[in-house]
């Protein structure tokens, strides 16, 4: 009898835990939906670098750190999904330079933007990341030997990366990341909905879900 009471109590507690978890996730999802509708700038700022059609109905917001290994791994996957759904997905890059010294690489990216070489520079950064972004012995200066591959004017980069405006946009992105509870990179949102749980397949499914919801065919 005592065993049955104990088992029954455990089942009730498990049920309450599951119900509470589902309620929390539902409330959290609603909160992000609300923010997407009423405070879109938290997700997309005027300075944010974007890739894809302005007519796209699916916005993929990525809080990214150039020194983040997982960001580098996900980059080609994201581009593959965009290529498979032409005109439907727009990528928005936000900065969350959580690694020590990662601001340095964000400054280079923003300077490269002025030369129209943003995406080329980001690709070079991700491909060469293992040489300069070692967690045990980071050597940021090594990035300069790879940057010519992006077709950059390096002297101009060294000048433009010191623009105080870049620090302000980094601060803004970090503030938005905190508001959205982004604690690690990459932090993905699709039309304001957070990627939970994190994973490649989960990101694929979330994007496909939003495409189905926003496009009739």
Image (tube, rainbow, N blue to C red):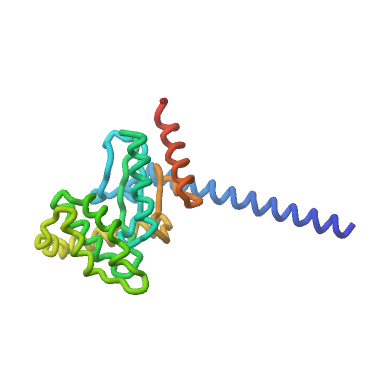
Would residue 52 be found to the left or right of residue 154 on screen? right
Residue 139 in the image: state x and y as whole percent. 27, 71
Residue appearing at x 49%, y 50% in the figure: 196
The N terminus - image quarter: bottom right
Residue situated in front as seen by the camera: 185 or 163: 185
Q: Position of residue 138 (x, y in %)?
A: 30, 71
Residue occupying image coordinates x 24% and y 48%: 46
84 and 48: which is toward the camera? 84
Residue 39 visible somewhere in the drawing:
no
For the residue pair 50 and 34, the one nearer the viewer reads as 50
176 relative to 112 in the view: left or right = right
Work out whether residue 125 or residue 17 is closer to the camera in this orientation and state it: 125
**For residue 45, above or below residue 80:** below
Which residue is at 27% across, 65% downward?
Answer: 103
Question: Residue 121 placed where, x, y %?
Answer: 22, 54
Query: In the picture shown, does residue 57 fall above or below 146?
Result: above
| Residue with the most extreme top position | 217
Is 20 drawn above or below residue 207 in the view shown?
below
195 lies left or right of 2: left
Residue 4: image quadrant is bottom right
The answer, for residue 196, to whether it is visible in the render is yes
Give the residue at the far bottom of this rendering.
137
On-image quarter of the C terminus: top left
Q: How many circles with numbers are drawn on the protein?
A: 0
């Amino acid at each position: 009898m005592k065993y049955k009471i104990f088992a029954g109590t455990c089942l009730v507690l498990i049920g309450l835990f599951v119900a509470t978890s589902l309620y929390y996730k539902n409330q959290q999802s609603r909160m992000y939906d609300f923010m997407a509708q009423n405070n879109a700038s938290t997700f997309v700022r005027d300075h944010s670098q974007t890739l894809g059609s302005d007519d796209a109905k699916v916005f993929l917001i990525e809080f990214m750190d150039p020194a983040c290994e997982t960001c580098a791994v996900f980059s080609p996957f994201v581009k593959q999904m965009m290529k498979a759904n032409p005109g439907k997905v727009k990528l928005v890059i936000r900065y969350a330079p959580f690694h020590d010294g990662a601001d340095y690489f964000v400054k280079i990216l923003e300077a490269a933007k002025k030369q129209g070489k943003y995406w080329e520079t980001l690709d070079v950064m991700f491909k060469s990341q293992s040489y300069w972004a070692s967690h045990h012995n980071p050597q940021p200066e090594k990035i300069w030997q790879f940057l010519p591959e992006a077709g950059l004017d390096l002297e101009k980069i060294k000048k433009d990366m010191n623009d105080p405006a870049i620090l302000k946009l980094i601060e803004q992105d970090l503030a938005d990341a905190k508001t959205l509870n982004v604690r690690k990179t990459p932090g993905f949102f699709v039309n304001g909905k957070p990627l939970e749980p994190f994973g490649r397949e989960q990101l694929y499914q979330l994007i496909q879900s939003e495409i189905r919801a926003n496009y009739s065919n």
